[in-house]
Amino acid sequence: MTITFILDALITVIGITTPILLAATGELIVEKSGVINLGVEGMMLVGAIAGFAVTFETGNPWLGILIAMVSGAVAASIFGVMVLSLGANQVATGLALTIFGIGLSSLIGSNYVGIAIDPLDSPFPDTLALDTFWRIVFGHSPFVYFAVFLVLATGFFLNKTRAGLVLRAVGENDFSAHSIGYPVIRIRYLAIAFGGAAAGIAGADFSLVISPLWAEQMTAGRGWIALALVVFAGWRAGRLLAGSYFFGVLMALELYAKASGFAILPSQFWAAMPYLIAVIVLALLSSRDGKGGKAPACLGKPFIPNG
Amino acid sequence: MRLRLEKRLEPSRKMLILTPVLSVVAIMVLGIIIFDGLGYDGPQAVWELFFTPVLDVYKWRDVATKAAPLIIIALGLSLSNQAKIWNIGAEGQYIVGAIAAAGVAYSTQSVTGFWIIPLMVLAGMLAGAAYAAIPAVLRTRYGVSEVLSSLMLVYVSLQLLSYMITGPWKDPNGHNFPQTAQLTAAQILPHDLLGSGIPPGLLVALLAALIFYIIVSCTVFGFSIRAIGEAPHAARYGGFRSDRIIWATLMISGAMAGLAGVFELMQLSRLNLGYPSGYGFTAIIVSLLGRSHPIGVFIAGLVLAITYVGGQVAQTVVHVPNATAGLFQALLLFAILASDLLVRYRIRLSFKGDIAAKRSVA
Amino acid sequence: MTKFTRRDFVKTAAAASVLPLMGASANAAEPLKVAYIYIGPVGDYGWTWAHDKGRKELEAALGSAVKTSYVENVKEDASAIPVLRDLARQGNKLIFATSFGYMDQVLEVAKEFPDVKFEHCTGFKRADNVTTYNSRFHEGRAVTGTLAGKVSKSGVIGYLGSFKIPEVVMGVNAYTLAAQAINPKIETKLVMIDSWFDPAKETSATETLANLGCDVIATHTDSPAPLQFCQKKGIFGFGQGADMSKFAPKAQLSAIEDIWGPHYIARAKAMIDGSWKSEDFWDGIKEGSVKISPYNASVPKDAQDAANKVFEGYRAGTYDVFTGPIYDQAGTLRVKAGEKLGLGDLATIDWYVKGVQSA
């Protein structure tokens, strides 16, 4: 096993990881504000078709990504109106959002089946990524760099800025936050829209880079993995970055083990691993950090201010 | 002038019944517009979606078949919902229940006896309950959110299913396809139980709804669930043990999901890759649409089953694409969930700001 | 629910079983109604898309003599039963169920509607009014395997599979044996992704195979994503189910096309002239059910010739890739020299030939 081989494998891992990292970063902000949105898969699909359709029609992938982001945020806002302004149950609304996203994307997408576009390449000149080592640094799609930037920026925002503190306060104790004058509902709206935008970009990663085409339900359940990832990371941005790459390594390991002829454990075991580990980590974190672990205290609870 | 929300002291009974009906009507109108806009026969599409399954006697069996697992699972969930315990993993418990029943079937292939079916049902319910016990342990021992742990376990159960049907329980006469052997006659309930014409699943759903109604409205247990859900701290002072309620509601909802899994296994007559069909997730919506009340759940299960069956009819008759039927279902869910607001709140137009509002409260 | 009595049930069931007969005798000039149920969306650009193309060919060929309809995204669970039943009740006389998982459901509904003919794709259970049909896709795999053997420089080729089912196993074996006929040292690395359709996983699995040295990769899953990756990476692959060259103009050496039209046309004609009977079809290159897309311009002449020879051999019935000696992975002789692996053995095959590296 050579260095080049490991570096090549690392490129696979990065490709697998990026969309779930993007979507999970968005969901992290949503959950930190005390809201749980189970509609990630639906928002990703809306982003995927929007990004693909706009890129195909205009030939401009950047515009495609922008519209994917906006569409994801708009889809998320439907959820926002439902749970924040109308007080609907978050779990049910999130599940309904997934059904909505699958239906809407399939309907729009029926005009875009069987169409090919050029994949979005690295933003850096080819001369910078000639050998494998430099490809690791410069050879990726813009999504890869953006995902890492976004999760780091999110970590900085949550831990080092005043606005981040307010967001966390809203998620930990909405009534106190409200009583000292923070606009709880408005902050949650923004968080939900951010989560949708990030999921939309993650969707565009599928339809513009990973497999530059549109096919119904092409995200194939990655939205649920993103939800698992937020739990696995214990609601912390740094761990989210590390955790997503850990998930990516696990998923790549399954493929490498099979292709190399190692059959130590059934493949289903590998596939179940990310979820099993998420549950175990959840238990470990909670037993270490006391009851409830690092989950935002108001997660999933409705907030309707009196008066 | 501004709009304001005002919490009702008691949920409005009138709105409780009126809002879902109005939502359905509103979505029908919207549906006619959308389908027409897309170039289909709008009125007919909506007719097929909502009315054909209700009016065509022949479709009742399909509605019943589809509604039964939804209602059975949702009844269990309605109990945990009332305690504000969110079991999102019913799909996993449903799958594990079916796996356990398939295990019984696997080991009783060459024998017959009246005891096989009860044993399958028991195994399914126990397995479902045991699978739900994992989030219960995590919640009561470590304070882990059951929303997340139960959801993660769904995906583990999918892999377990895949392993069992590709490995140990693969049908030896199945041409090496990933599926278990077909259930024998002694392992399937007759489609027409007791000559009632009602599919066995729906009969069980009906019975279960009755039992849950009694539990919820007539027993101390039912009362303590609501007490925990509505005011956990006060309930604790009143001597209710919240841990016990968490355990009980999760295990019961798991057992019900497992039970639905057993009946669905008998419907399909074997386990294969097509088995997990999302009933556990849809049931969450059913339990909430039914406002976690046994009768409401029963009706909501029927309504959702009608839209599924109607969606298929609309596809064959009006050639509406499958995606549109799904979109439509989502819009209906949004409308019903949103209109829930009117049950719990009054919307007031106030002209003089806070003074008027305060007066109306007093 | 009070009206839901047994009597109603018997009444409607009786009415339903009479309906098809009435339809048939009422007007002989009525078009034959043909229906399809699909596992995926018609827009999957793979399996379902190919069947729907066949449906359109049937409409084009028989014009006003047939009337077709379809239901897409029908799950392989108990909910397929009401869909099949509905189609039968709506007067469809010939119903095609196009996925393996509909097997038991088709047989159950077929019992209720003895006058409606059902055809189940890829299954193995038949009845008086249930026919099964399938394609010998592995013949196409033998052609693409020949190309892979010629084009591969590394001597390591890849195969991206879905599940370990006979169809995929015989595909891997045909591909590997054909490549070994060109270059005896060739090895096939196999990855099963436990899904028919997951573009992201298909892409990373293809990437994995490429990193392990495969320079030609065949796919047995449904999306063009693996080919798109091959294009990006500068290696080669094959289209699956349809000509996918527009997704990967450089990387697609050729493609195996599923052609269902001829079968659908023949069966509808048989219905119209009354010659339909329950059969088991397993058609291949000879019958026109499996086609090979035009070769990429980059395929060398000798490779084209070798592939053509296999294709023509199948067409003439003179060639079979499963001709012994064939050894399995452990080196055991499974098929003696000069003997052939029968179709019956192929239909249930669960072992890989020597040279396949699998987990």
Image (cartoon, coloured by chain):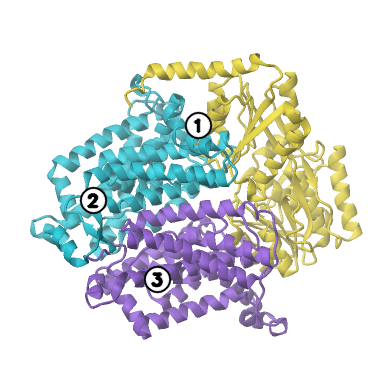
Side of B357 relative to C79 (left or right): left
Is residue C3 something that shows in the picture?
A: yes
Of discs 3 and 2, which sits in the foreground?
Answer: 3
The kind of residue on which mark 2 rests is Gln
Along the viewing direction, whichever of C258 and C62 lies nearer the viewer: C62
Q: Quadrant of residue A131?
A: bottom right
Local SS, label 2? helix
**Which residue is label 1 attached to?**
C82
Rendered location of residue C302, percent (x, y): 91, 57
**Which residue is label 3 attached to?**
A191
Side of B197 relative to A135 (left or right): left
Name the tint of chain A in the rendering: purple
Side of C190 relative to C101 (left or right): right
The residue depicted at 79 percent of the width and 64 percent of the height is C250
Mark 3, Cα crowd under 10 Å, few <14 / some 14-19 / many 20+, is many
Q: CA distance from mark 3 to mark 2?
A: 28 Å
Along the viewing direction, whichever of C81 and B345 lies nearer the viewer: B345
The kind of residue on which mark 3 rests is Ala
Name the tint of chain C in the rendering: yellow
Q: Are marks 3 and 2 on the same chain?
A: no
Chain designation of label 3: A
Rendered location of residue A193, percent (x, y): 43, 68
Rendered location of residue B249, percent (x, y): 24, 49
Q: Are marks 2 and 1 on the same chain?
A: no
Q: Which mark is residue B82?
A: 2
* Farthest-out residue, left: B238
Chain designation of label 1: C
Rendered location of residue B160, percent (x, y): 45, 51
Quarter of the figure with the C terminus of chain B: bottom left
Local SS, label 1? helix
Chain displayed in cyan: B
The kind of residue on which mark 1 rests is Pro
